[in-house]
Image (cartoon, coloured by chain):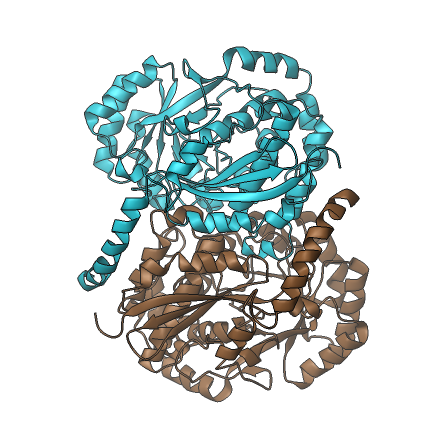
Chain colours: A brown, B cyan
Amino acid sequence: MSGPVITALETHDVRFPTSRELDGSDAMNPDPDYSAAYVVLRTTGTVDGHGFAFTIGRGNEVQTTAIRALAPYVVGRGLDDLGVLYKDMVNDSQLRWLGPEKGVMHMAISAVVNALWDLKAKLEGKPLWLLLGEMSPEEIVSLVDFRYLTDALTPDEALRILQEAEPGRAARIAALKVDGYPAYTTSPGWLGYDDDKLRRLCKEAIEAGFTQIKLKVGADLEDDRRRMRIAREVCGPGFRIAVDANQRWDVGSAIRWVNELREFDPYWVEEPTSPDDVLGHATIARALAPVKVATGEHVQNRMIFKQMLQAGSMSVVQLDAARVGGVNENIAILLLAAKFGVPVCPHAGGVGLCELVQHLAMFDYVAVSGTMRDRVIEYVDHLHEHFADPVVIVNGRYQAPLAPGFSAAMLPESIADHLYPDGPVWRDEVAGASVATVTELPGREGAA
Amino acid sequence: MSGPVITALETHDVRFPTSRELDGSDAMNPDPDYSAAYVVLRTTGTVDGHGFAFTIGRGNEVQTTAIRALAPYVVGRGLDDLGVLYKDMVNDSQLRWLGPEKGVMHMAISAVVNALWDLKAKLEGKPLWLLLGEMSPEEIVSLVDFRYLTDALTPDEALRILQEAEPGRAARIAALKVDGYPAYTTSPGWLGYDDDKLRRLCKEAIEAGFTQIKLKVGADLEDDRRRMRIAREVCGPGFRIAVDANQRWDVGSAIRWVNELREFDPYWVEEPTSPDDVLGHATIARALAPVKVATGEHVQNRMIFKQMLQAGSMSVVQLDAARVGGVNENIAILLLAAKFGVPVCPHAGGVGLCELVQHLAMFDYVAVSGTMRDRVIEYVDHLHEHFADPVVIVNGRYQAPLAPGFSAAMLPESIADHLYPDGPVWRDEVAGASVATVTELPGREGAA
């Protein structure tokens, strides 16, 4: 074993009181408090690894408890083989019962795996996208767990995909350093905004160089038609306007609702129904074509992505950096998307997700798909000020991060301020709320 | 609101050191410590509600933390409408991010929902199967969350299924009280047993009146062929012998492996691959017919069951009492199975799962499917001595439980003895293990 050894795994329950504003409100998540179950890996060396699972408030303490359960799998170990470390966590004979490979325990693995990659990239002195983008095809394949994938993608096929993309790597790395990677913005489209704010934010998005925007839909059809009409008026014909239902509909209602929006030319419909419903998404995709179906931020693991690609359920793969098993499983998902020829447009927003996914999209461009065609990274302008190496958007494009690591580290003072329930941002509200809860709950039941 | 109000939610981390024996070993779970993240709901009345999520050891503390996160949803509330209470927990706008409806957070909901039903059945003075079996079709439909189901099952269709089964209810209740419900046994088939023990346990199973047994397979093909040959010799032609791979295979290897066992006439193959793989199970089912495909114990929610039924992925629905959202979601799954005409043979074993699922199978017989044809409840003879109202098996059949409640309550002394890490069963081992962990971990990495 070369290099430093991990000596401790620390967690922090960090929550931002975003529900006090209407930023981030959608049809299923009306009042999110964007939160991070944050993990720091301490080492015998001078650098630490940082990672997190993203949640939207309540239950963030469950997520931090799950991350702590992984301490025995990393403490005492080095960073020589993150493929082995990842597979040891995912395949632990007892922990896997809590998923397997889904939900809280899998998101915890994601946080720890990403922290390991943050640490490794810092030790190598490279941003993660470049570290991965310079690995050999064989090294990259060794990071993936092909269990349950081989009916759709074998290790040999994965190797060939990576080998075919090898020739242009240097040119693409250079291009990223100059021009970055295209983004789209969700900022105009939250449900809580009035029409004037929507109109103003659409204009600002175009002026800022974005070539796609996204509107939240699904709460009220007439509202959605009015908002889509306004956005189309401001953005003009041909401009890509995606809509996002955040899992609000059943299969039949998804088809009916989006048909009512067709005259405004939606580019994709995102999360029309349950993220678990492979067959339902396929039915919706057939009924709504040429409107694309996009999903992925809540897709739990590579097995569901595999099936959605096999069944034609998705035309856009929206991988999330911190829900599946971290960097390693996302490499599997990038390879599956390349195999099926479907573009990857990562999910971002929340807190810190933009910072993470830019590395995955740029790695995809360098070493996997080799193209940016029809690919954009989501951008939401929330909470970047809390990160040590925040994303930089210029003319609607993510600039390639150059600092070593995975851009995952939050500023120490941001962590301290937002600790739940004892940090200064929460202390008074939590103390008040417990009194309110006690007096309010019997009333709630009585009213039902 | 009538009746008592819930005043507190308590949790206990209860673990049985079953890995010290080879009972319970299979191809994916070689060393389970059967555990319960146990919950007690205290009330203003004289009875309490008991429930639990089943885990196999490590991570049980994550599961208890998740259950505690649900306290605000039940404390201060009564039991008038368990449909509303269930939907409030499942659809909480922040907690659902941790699933949605899968993994640790969903299993926590299961534990609490089941404890609510235990409490309600005790208050009504009836065993749960009878309480549910005497409800009106309309009441039963109101307990189900039809979100994401309506492309396969609407509330009206569910109502018709229940109404059609109404006429024979009284006769079936009487039949259950006399004859019980058929069981099959997994006890002969654990991987750790030698051939003589397998032979002896097969004989004992037949002598005890069971008409089906199950063998664990998937670790070594030659071993499996030898064990199947022995079991078939002892049980004779036509006797139902199921095999269970516990998710060990990819799609292709499942088909190849089971084809090698065909000469021994396996009745069903259980969990051939990932429980998330709807399309993979469908491919396996087509290739292996007439050998049936059974799965469900790790199927996360009604959406995956729905798709498996739509796609022809399963010929046997093995619902689990404590993984999906408890009684309410299992009613949805029973209705889906009835709609598609697929028999339900519940998963059991572990700790306390036999106690719970017998109620669901008996309710299905009384009020949903109305038949026992090709239906059996799994039986494993582990750990029943720790329950206040343990299952009773006579001549290979579960006897209908008659005590009020859901048979979920563990004996107080069993809970106290097995508390982790401070109960008497664990105290010394845990103290020893922490020393071993510290000295062992660098060595493990050094050897890799």
Q: How many marks?
A: 0
Which residue extends farthest bottom? A178
Above-or-below relation of B441 to A363: above
Q: Position of residue B44 (x, y in %)?
A: 66, 36
**Image vertical order of residue B164 relative to residue A41, above or below:** above
Question: Which residue corresponds to the image point at 57% horizontal and 64% vertical from the top-left?
Answer: A421
Residue at (28, 50) in percent of width and height: B431
Residue A301 shows in the view: no
Q: In this rendering, would B70 be left or right of A217?
A: left
The image quadrant where one finds the C terminus of chain B is bottom left
Along the line of sight, which residue is nearer the eye, B321 or A364?
B321
The answer to whether residue B107 is left or right of residue A90 is right
Q: Is residue A419 left or right of residue A105?
A: right
Kindly indicate the quadrant of the structure image that contains residue B404: top right
- Image spot of residue A441 (x, y percent): 71, 49
- Residue B222's x, y, as percent? 21, 35
Residue A392 shown left or right of residue B153 in the figure: left
Residue B37 or residue B155, whichever sits in front = B37
x then y, percent, for residue B358:
51, 25
- Viewer-nearest residue: A401 or A175: A401
Residue in the image at 60% along x and 82% along y: A396
Q: Is residue B430 visible?
A: yes
Q: Quadrant of the N terminus of chain B?
A: top right
From what the image shows, is residue A16 above or below residue B118? below
Task: Identify which residue is drawn at 25% across, 33% down.
Answer: B224
Q: Quadrant of residue B24?
A: top left
